[in-house]
Amino acid sequence: MTTGFAYRGGVLHAEGVALPEIAKAVGTPFYCYSSATLEDRYRKFSGAFAGMKATVCFALKANSSLAVVKTFAVLGAGADVVSGGEMLIALAAGIDPKRIVFSGVGKTRAEMAAALQAGIGQFNVESEAELRVLSEVAVARRTKAPIAIRINPDVDAHTHEKITTGRATDKFGIDIARARDAYALARSLKGIETVGVAVHIGSQILDLAPFRAAFARITELARELGGIARMDLGGGLGIAYDGGAAPDPTDYAAVVREATKGFTGELVFEPGRYLAADAGVLVAAVLYIKDSGPKRFVIVDAAMNDLIRPALYGAHHEIVAVAEPAANAPLAEADVVGPVCESGDVLGAARALPPLGEGALIAVKSAGAYGATMASEYNSRPLVPEVMVHGATYAVIRPRPSREAMLAREALPPWLADAGAARRKTRA
């Protein structure tokens, strides 16, 4: 069972709170996060680098909830952001600007200016064109932008095609063969201060060998370049979505120590999934059970717009009943699907599930990363609420918007707004 979530008295709890209690208060579906799990994962990851000059920057793309980010900020984390919006959340959570890294291939001039104004510690630059623009923006503000150039080491992380980022054919980073020229350019630009070198080869990586290869290449490059005070080694450490084996941070740290031997500067890490995924579940209610001959469907009120990973990546999430099934409960295979009008709206295919009636609650595990942060209002479905549990208490950290509030965001152009009045006048 996901850390922080366990059965007590026959009911699945988040720490000391029964999930049905939250469901009664906020309705379903909803995301629920365990504070204890967030804290435990951060301490395990950061503790693995004890004795090293290491900065852990939580990757907000995994979960940008202000309460989640604040939880890590209190523990001393920095932030890895990929948009101006994420930067504002990191600052609002109280993260020291000097511990904020701004990544991403498409930073705008406005985002660059805002980040310079905030005084962030590092831009991860991903192209020569971006380097020139960033210098222009910095010069116009009479300052210098501290940068690390993100290097593409042409290392295949052997993860899903859509979350692999370190191959020569991927859009991320500057090819390692051009790195020396890129650094020469950076050092010639008036608005640039070169502080480091960066690499990130993908996400949900379960094999440590690609990390070892990428980190060794970057360390060698840093030695050749000289004057490199910081190496940003990115994130990507995977978790066991299917209950199998996953690397431990101590094993990952051992690879880092081996690959960066001799480097005496600061190391930066940008974990996201490892810190947040197992700290969250998506809770949904069963609407209908549908038998259609060759298939049995459990139709729930959560959908692909709430958790898109299964539809987007074919990702696997364990799904369990909130009411603990009896040890000898019969299991029947079913697809767990949502109400969205897409055949791809499947949260879990061919799952062996205990008997579930209408109104029963299920929990989709390991949904604390790339869940709510990738959600949408497709089919005009409201974003689901997010709840954080702390011991025996809980709080709604993002409420469910009402449909009236969603409609209030819309506006008709004058020719349509007037059309109804004109039509009524003509009929009169």
Image (cartoon, helix red, strand yellow):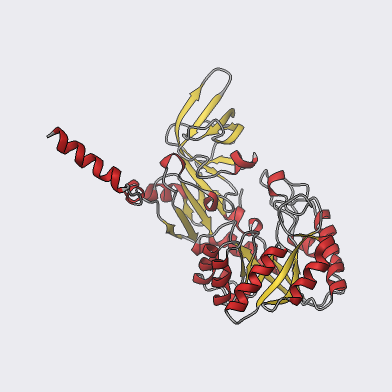
Toward the top, the furthest residue is 293
Q: Quadrant of the C terminus?
A: top left
Numbered disc total: 0
Decide if residue 196 is on the left or right side of residue 217: left
Decide if residue 241 is on the left or right side of residue 247: left
Residue at 61 percent across and 41 percent down: it is 312
Residue 230 position in % (x across, y down): 75, 74
Is residue 51 visible to us here?
no
Compare residues 32 and 16 and report the one nearer the observer: 32
Which of the 4 image quadrants contains residue 40?
Answer: bottom right
Residue 399 position in % (x across, y down): 40, 55
Residue at 42 percent across and 42 percent down: it is 381
Toward the bottom, the furthest residue is 142
Compare residues 158 and 324 and report the one nearer the observer: 158
Toward the left, the furthest residue is 428
Task: In the rendered view, tell whether residue 1 sits above or below residue 255.
Answer: above
Decide if residue 384 is on the left or right side of residue 324: left
Residue at 56 percent across and 57 percent down: it is 63
Task: In the rendered view, tell whether residue 346 sits above or below residue 3.
Answer: above
Residue 101 position in % (x across, y down): 64, 69
Residue 194 position in % (x across, y down): 73, 75
Which of the 4 image quadrants contains residue 285?
Answer: top left
Is residue 216 visible to us here?
yes
